[in-house]
Amino acid sequence: MRTLWRVAAVVVLAVAVGAFDLFTSERHGFFDLKVYWGALNYWSNHGGMIYDYLNPNTLYGFTYPPFAALVMLPMAWVQWETAIRISVVLTVIVSSVLVWWMARPISQRQGWSPWFTFAIAACMVAAFEPMRETVNFGQVNMLLLFLVAADVLFLLARKSPWAGVGIGLATAIKLTPGVFIIYLLVTKRWRAAITSMATAAFVTLIAGLIAPNATREFWTSALLDTDRVGQLGFISNQSLQGVVARVFLGDMKPVWAVLVLITLVYWGWRSRKAAVAGDERAGLALTAVVGCLISPVTWVHHLVWLLPALFLVAGAGFRETGRRKWVLLSVAFVSWAILCSRLVWLWRFDNTGWGLPFVFGSSYIWISIVLLVLIPIEATAKSEEPKTEDQAEGTEKDSSSPSLVA
């Protein structure tokens, strides 16, 4: 009877989320996927330069490194409708795996049914605006998050000699996951850091040998052409650079640089604490959030990188007691609700100044900052310094009385 009630609850929630997505989602026509598909066809089938291609009637072109073009090249050999199906199916598969990885510790701690916890979590993620935008744009965000999370949660956590490979591949596909290489350096995982840099360099070199002209064009001109990615002050840019551009209406890079420096110092301090505690989940969440904040451009669909932080804050809320329990659960729920709401778009055409556009038009940025502060760090091991791969693995773990490091 309990199982029947749970199945019924999941069905009702799934129908409600489906209706919510149907009426609230923007139909972007897989715009980004169309850029990839068009550029790859232009490059592979028509002999053009991949970075010369612009989506018809727009200024948007292919912005990723040449290795990404090689990874995506099979897309040029299929019809447009097939490319859409492949994009959606791959996103659903890796997203499901990621939700399972993130929800599983919560169900284990609380003694909840794993399938029921996963089903509820998957429905809530499906309502998440960044997830909806990722699917409707045909973006690669979840594939990159999958590569990085698999590396950090399994290879790095188990001190595998292959730790860093996933981060290196993700960085070679799109430069922004390179912040995780900095995470490895800050936390003194030297071998993993070298592996990640070597992986990124190796596949980039291979791409250079296969496509030398595209490689030269990307690193000498396309990388520096900011017009290819859109305007920094556009409301969808929910990064520190975005809010600075909207407030000051000009080139205020010094202000942005100071904010980035402060953010990185705080992140580095907390990341080191996570490494000392042996909490790789916290390290993943902290670095994913800081990547969204410091990137010059963080479109709404990039904010799927906030998912590990939301799961950690919610999980900590469930296992805490008293006032802290309700603070963490409230932050997790309110953050999720706002990130489902499309709130920032109410200020799409009036997004400048210090008033309501500053408060609500940049609300996703404030959520990112709150999460960066509240991500719990669970002490799973006693250590003075974060362990490197070359050190002995003799530290005893005390799992009987885990604690949260503020």
Image (cartoon, helix red, strand yellow):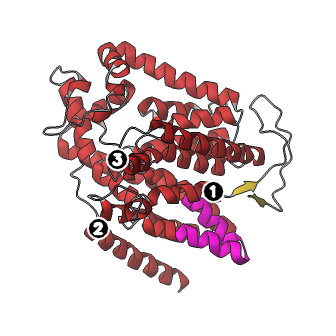
Q: Does the magenta stretch include residue 50?
A: no
The Cα–Cα distance between marks 1 and 3, rounded to whole angstroms, is 25 Å
Query: Is there a contact, CB below 8 Å, between mark 2 and mark 1?
Result: no
According to the image, label 1 marks what residue? 373
Q: What numbered label is drawn on residue 24? A: 2
Q: Magenta region's main secondary structure?
A: helix
**Left or right of residue 390: residue 333:** left
Circle 1 crowding by C-alpha within 10 Å: few under 14, some 14–19, many from 20? some
Residue 208, placed above or below residue 137:
above
On the rendered image, what quadrant is the C terminus found in? bottom right
According to the image, label 3 marks what residue? 233
**Magenta segment boundaries in residue numbering:** 309-333
The Cα–Cα distance between marks 2 and 3, rounded to whole angstroms, is 24 Å
- Amino acid of disc 3: Gly
- Amino acid of disc 2: Thr
- Residue drawn at (65%, 30%), measured in percent from left and top? 192
- Residue drawn at (26%, 25%), measured in percent from left and top? 51
**Secondary structure state at the residue bearing disc 1:** helix
Question: Closer to the camera: disc 2 or disc 1?
Answer: 1
